[in-house]
Image: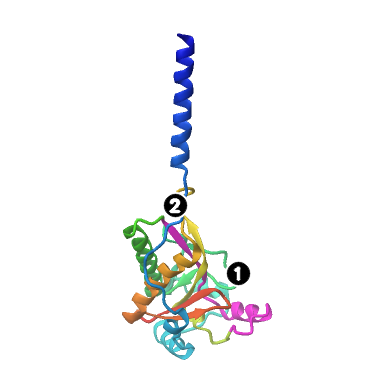
């Protein structure tokens, strides 16, 4: 009798282990969208972006971060949420004009919606640069970035950068996606909004980001 009970217990244990392995199994899954040439599609000129930034953004470029604090009524703080992560910012501050901040939120919502609609795991993208003061631009130039223009679109609160090589998985375990495929999802969102005249987009290969200016 005791041998039979022991046999049953061993079988139950093996069954539980087997189920546990199935529950923790991880599979690479893919977004089925068609790839496209990022350089070709996202090649909006700096002159176009700067014109939109000046027309829709801050009238006065902040000299310092202290001045940004004084201008907060004209801006909205950008914070990490369920759809994107505000990265550790070294040469910018997490503020945008209300319209640009709303556009960023909409990009995040559309990104999450595409993943959910296709039965894919939830990821968040990274916001890597936002509003720059004149002091931030000068500091960036001193750090060796010769492309940091003193008349940058980032100075007007309309422009933000989104990384395309890093994504944050909302939940540990389960199915996963690779960065190139997540880049395609984010790229599709930006392409849709670019075609609707909502944003300008520049594909930045050196900085590994999409450089975006809100046109609204």
- Which of disc 1 and disc 2 is earlier in sequence? 1
- Where is the N terminus found, in terms of image quarters? top left
Tell me the residue at 51%/80% (across/down).
155
Q: Secondary structure at mark 2?
A: loop
Asked if one can make out residue 176 in the rendered structure from this viewpoint, the answer is yes
Residue 108, horizontal then vertical, whole percent: 39, 65
Answer whether residue 144 is magenta in the image.
yes
- Given residues 173 and 55, the one toward you in this image is 173
> Split into 4 quadrants, where in the image is the C terminus?
bottom left
Q: Is residue 150 above or below residue 27?
A: below
As drawn, the residue found furthest toward the bottom would be: 47
Where residue 192 appears, as percent x and y from the top left, is: 34, 75
Q: Residue at point 45% right, 31% down?
A: 16
Seen from the viewer's position, the closer of residues 67 and 120 is 120
Residue 117 horizontal side relative to residue 90, left or right = left
* Residue 45: x %, y % from top left: 46, 88
What residue sits right under mark 1 in the picture?
A: 90
**Is residue 81 at least partly visible in the picture?**
no
Q: Secondary structure at mark 1?
A: loop
How many numbered discs sit on the rendered protein? 2
Label annotation for residue 204: none
Tell me if residue 213 comes above or below residue 33 in the rendering: below
- The residues colored magenta run 122-148
Residue closest to the eye, 27 or 113:
27
Residue drawn at point x = 55 percent, y = 73 percent? 208
Residue assigned mark 2: 175
Magenta stretch holds residue 69: no
Q: Residues within 10 Å of mark 2 (few under 14, many from 20)?
A: some
Check the image and report above or below for 154 versus 47: above
Q: CA distance from mark 2 to mark 1?
A: 33 Å
Decide which of 1, 87 is in the foreground and name it.
1
């Amino acid at each position: 009798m005791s041998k039979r009970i022991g046999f049953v217990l061993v079988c139950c244990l093996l069954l539980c282990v087997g189920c546990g392995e199935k529950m923790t199994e991880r599979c690479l899954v893919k977004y089925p969208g068609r790839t496209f040439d990022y350089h070709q599609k996202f090649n909006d000129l700096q002159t176009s972006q700067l014109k939109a930034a000046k027309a829709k953004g801050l009238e006065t470029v902040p000299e310092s971060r202290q001045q940004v604090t004084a201008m907060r009524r004209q801006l909205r703080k950008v914070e990490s949420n369920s759809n994107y992560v505000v990265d550790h910012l070294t040469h910018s501050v997490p503020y945008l004009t209300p319209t640009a901040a709303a556009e960023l939120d909409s990009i995040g919502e559309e990104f999450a919606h595409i993943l959910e609609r296709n039965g894919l795991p939830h990821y968040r993208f990274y916001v890597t640069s936002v509003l720059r003061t004149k002091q931030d631009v000068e500091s960036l130039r001193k750090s060796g970035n010769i492309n940091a223009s003193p008349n940058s679109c980032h100075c007007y609160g309309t422009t933000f950068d989104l990384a395309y090589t890093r994504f944050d998985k909302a939940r540990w375990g389960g199915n996963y996606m690779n960065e190139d495929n997540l880049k395609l999802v984010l790229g599709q969102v930006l392409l849709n909004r670019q075609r609707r005249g909502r944003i300008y987009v520049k594909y930045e290969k050196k900085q590994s980001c999409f450089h975006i200016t809100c046109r609204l």
